[in-house]
Amino acid sequence: MPAEPVNVNEFQQLAKEAIPKMYYDFYAGGAEDEFSLKENMEAFRRITLRPRVLVDVSRIDLSTTVLGFPISAPIMIAPTALHKLAHPEGEVATAKAAAACNTIMVLSFTSTCTVEEVASSCKAVRFFQLYVYKRRDVAAVLVQRAERNGYKALVLTVDVPRLGRREADIKNNMIAPQLKNLDGLFSTQVESDKGSNMERFANQTLDASLRWEDIAWLRSITNLPIIIKGILTGEDAIKAAEVGVAGIVVSNHGARQLDYSPATISVLEEVVHATKGKIPVLFDGGVRRGTDVFKALALGAQAVLVGRPVIFGLAAKGEAGVRRVIEMLKNELELTMALSGCPRVKDITRSHVRTEKDRLH
Ligand code: FNR
């Protein structure tokens, strides 16, 4: 029997052994050269910590809030597609783990359990991630269903006007299953005997004409707060604040879209400065350690979202695996805060990290 993992990275190998290669490659892979995929993690390594001593750290409080919703730690579950390819219970297992860890799960639009199934299995606060298709009525239906089923916010993903080129999926002739939320609306199966059928489906279906002006349309069909996911520049952060969304996620989609987009941690501070504190900034990309969470908070993120480690935990050990992944990150963050002299999340400040830019000055 393989040894129990002692950190979230060790779940990756277990996941690789647990599921078919085509699915593992789909989860693990990035776009084209996978430069940004490596950079998302490498850039964290170039940031060091500036710990303070002789602070009372006998009690560490990880709790925080996101859009006013209390969570046990600033670590949330990112929206990721197709959880049933990792484990038969799919997103329901992930949602149960989120509830057990008292954190927020963002359910992917492209899930293999429905909005309703996940809602009835999970008491925790849930957000719903949205893609906008050419057929806008589909988004409208899904938004209504999310509202009816108690999802508390919409996370509009804006970095997929077309699908990035994921070469592993092309080589594997990746075939995605029917997307459960779209049952009865339309078939997500497209004819293709070569390449990634997901890429073909996405490119036929996604509305590549979506613009900033369309946020008003989305607002007109929902009362839920809207978070924009996929911001990488100060310019777009300013626009997001101007159109009045409830928050943004600094994200390069786990490096699955535009290769050579910057490591997300390297642009977080630029984005935070641009928002001037007007809207909360969430963060994802490459978070694998409690120290990574700490660094993102120090650079101004309110919380981080975790993608692949959650899927690897799910593939390796189902709900218990996801729980373990979140607990490991929480435990590591708690220790990092203790060793850095930060008893509460709000004690983590810019002066607790040294970035490459700081070293140049
Ligand atoms: C994703 N991501 C994603 N994002 C989104 O808005 N909707 C989605 O359906 C998906 N699907 C998806 C599938 C897989 C397999 C991965 C790895 C990622 C992106 C995700 O929300 C998040 O931005 C990244 O996963 C964060 O990077 P890490 O934590 O995986 O390094």
Image (cartoon, rainbow, N blue to C red):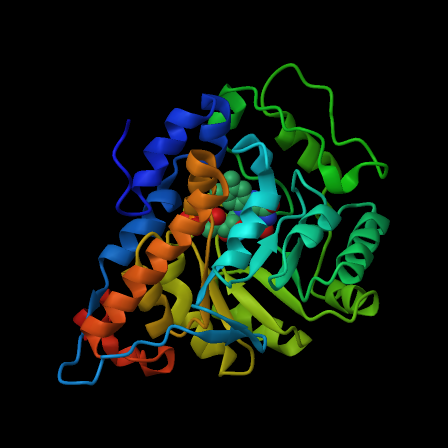
Picture coordinates of residue 145 (x, y %)? 80, 55
Compare residues 196 and 67 and report the one nearer the observer.
Answer: 67
Picture coordinates of residue 33 (x, y %)? 39, 35
Compare residues 220 and 141 and report the one nearer the observer.
Answer: 141
Q: In this view, does 128 lie above or below 260?
A: below
Q: Can residue 235 be seen in this view?
A: yes
Residue at 41% x, 45% y is 309
Q: Quadrant of residue 17?
A: top left
Picture coordinates of residue 19 (x, y %)? 46, 26
Q: In which quarter of the image is residue 293?
A: bottom left
Q: Residue furthest left?
A: 54
Compare residues 347 and 326 and report the one nearer the observer.
Answer: 326
- Answer with left or right where residue 89 lies relative to residue 191: left
- Answer with left or right where residue 163 lies relative to residue 323: right
Q: Is residue 30 visible?
A: no
Q: Quadrant of the N terminus?
A: top left
- Answer with left or right where residue 133 lies relative to residue 352: right
Residue at 13% x, 81% y is 53
Picture coordinates of residue 339 (x, y %)? 19, 72
Residue at 80% x, 60% y is 148
Residue at 36% x, 67% y is 296
